[in-house]
Every structure is written in C-alpha cells, then in structure tokens.
Image: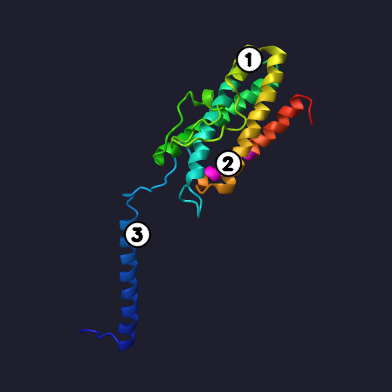
Amino acid sequence: MAISRSPLRRSLLRPAAAVAVAVTAALVLTACGGDGGSASPHRPGHGTGAAAPSAGHTGHNAQDVAFAQQMIPHHRQAVAMAALAPTRANSQQVKDLAAKIRKAQDPEIDTMTGWLRDWDAAVPDADASAMADMPGMDHSGSGHSAAPMPGMMSDADMSGLEKMSGDAFDRAFLRMMIGHHEGALAMARTERAQGDYGPAIALAKSIVTSQSAEISGMRKMLGER
C-alpha cells in the first residue's frame, strides 16, 4: 500500500533540495576558479622569497623600479666591502657585522633582481657599483640621467680599504659603512614615501629598521654616541 506524503512534508523537502543544488553549484564554480591557469602580472621575483603584494599595493610605479635598480648596486658594494673583513679586520665585532651584512643583503639583491625581471626592467650590470658614484650616470636603463646614489664609495675609497688591515681597516670600514648605510636610508625613505609596490615598500621599511640599528652599533664601536 503506497503512503502518500503530506503537503507539509512536500513543502519542507523542496527548500532542502534547492539548498543542495545551490551548494553543489557553488562547489563547481570554486573548483573552476582555482585552477591557477593565469599568473598575476605583478608577481614577486622568481624563487627569491619576496613577499606577496599587500592589499592596495599590487602594482608598481617608476619609483619602485628606480629603487630596485639603484639599491642592487648599492647592496653589491656593501657586500664587497663586507667580504674584505674576514681577512683584514682585527675586531671580531667588525667581522661579525660584516657577516651579518652579507647574509642580509645578498638575498635582497636576488629579490630585487627578480622584481626587475618580472617588470621587464633593466637589471644593473655586476660592475655598476664601480661607476655608481659618477654624476649623471644613468642607473635606470631608460636613457635619462639619474642623480648619483647616496653613500656610494668611489673606486679610490674601495682601493684604499683593500690595502688596509688590522685596526686601521676596522676604523675605515666602520666609517665608510656608516656613510653607506645612511645613503641606503635616504633611498629607502624615498621608496616608502613614493613607491607603490607592497613588497618593495616592505623591504624599504626593513632596511630603515635594520640599518639604523647597525649605524648605532658601528658608532658605539668607534667610541661615538
């Protein structure tokens, strides 16, 4: 004998069936939208560990490009200075500081290089740091003259440092690196004020924090306040 469903039971089943259909449709749409088939036009550097863009900062502007193009040779020179310390420095504090600088700035060079490649912008040549102190040097690859980067050492400064050792090297290294860091702070503050790319702004903030602390430490090593 067939049991007929009451009108009330049929009315309850219809909304339940509608909900099931809606949930199924939503799952299908989610699966279709998450296939990763398209890439972001402003992705971070390839395998460089760069942070994802923050909300509201998914694009980049000319200042972001200039920041990366100028900070790369700036960092390269700092790394070159730091590479002299293991065999020339007398102070273990100076050696430890140099190792810290190399450990921090080498990966940042890779990160910024990745950004420039993603943006189809010119990556500075490896020898750009040797020419960075020349007035009117074009660092942008755009054919327009750019101001010399602040804090960069001249070829003569670098050659002189290479010839030093012991306490004389320690003092010269600290004084030169203080000036170099102060130049990086100026560049980073400009990026914070005028940049648009979230990871570049975040890196600039990190540079201000870390290098300000290192400047204070170096001044203490020199007996300065």
Q: Main secondary structure of the magenta part?
A: helix
1 vs 2, front mark = 1
Q: Taking 51 as reference, is 158 left or right?
A: right
Does residue 99 belong to the magenta stretch? no
Q: Nearer the viewer, residue 75 or 49?
A: 75
Residue displayed at 61% across by 35% down: 184
Q: Nearer the viewer, residue 187 or 85?
A: 187
Quarter of the image for the N terminus: give it: bottom left
Cα separation, mark 1 vs mark 2, equals: 30 Å
Please state the horizontal and vertical placement of residue 200, each as a whole percent of the image. 52, 43
Q: In the image, what residue type sits under mark 3?
A: Thr
Q: Quadrant of residue 9?
A: bottom left
| Label ID, residue 160 | 1
Please state the horizontal and vertical placement of residue 96, each as a whole percent of the image. 65, 23
Q: Residues within 10 Å of mark 2 (few under 14, many from 20)?
A: many
Please state the horizontal and vertical placement of residue 23, each as a whole percent of the image. 34, 67
Q: Taking 132 as reference, is 218 left or right?
A: right
Tell me the element at label 3.
helix
Tell me the element at label 2.
helix
Location of mark 2 (residue) = 204
Q: Height in image: 196 above or below 217? A: below
Query: Which one is earlier in the sequence, the residue at label 1 or at label 2?
Result: 1
Cα separation, mark 2 vs mark 3, equals: 37 Å
Location of mark 3 (residue) = 30
Q: In the image, what residue type sits under mark 1?
A: Gly
Query: Which one is earlier in the sequence, the residue at label 2 or at label 3?
Result: 3
Q: Height in image: 35 above or below 51? A: below
| Label ID, residue 86 | none
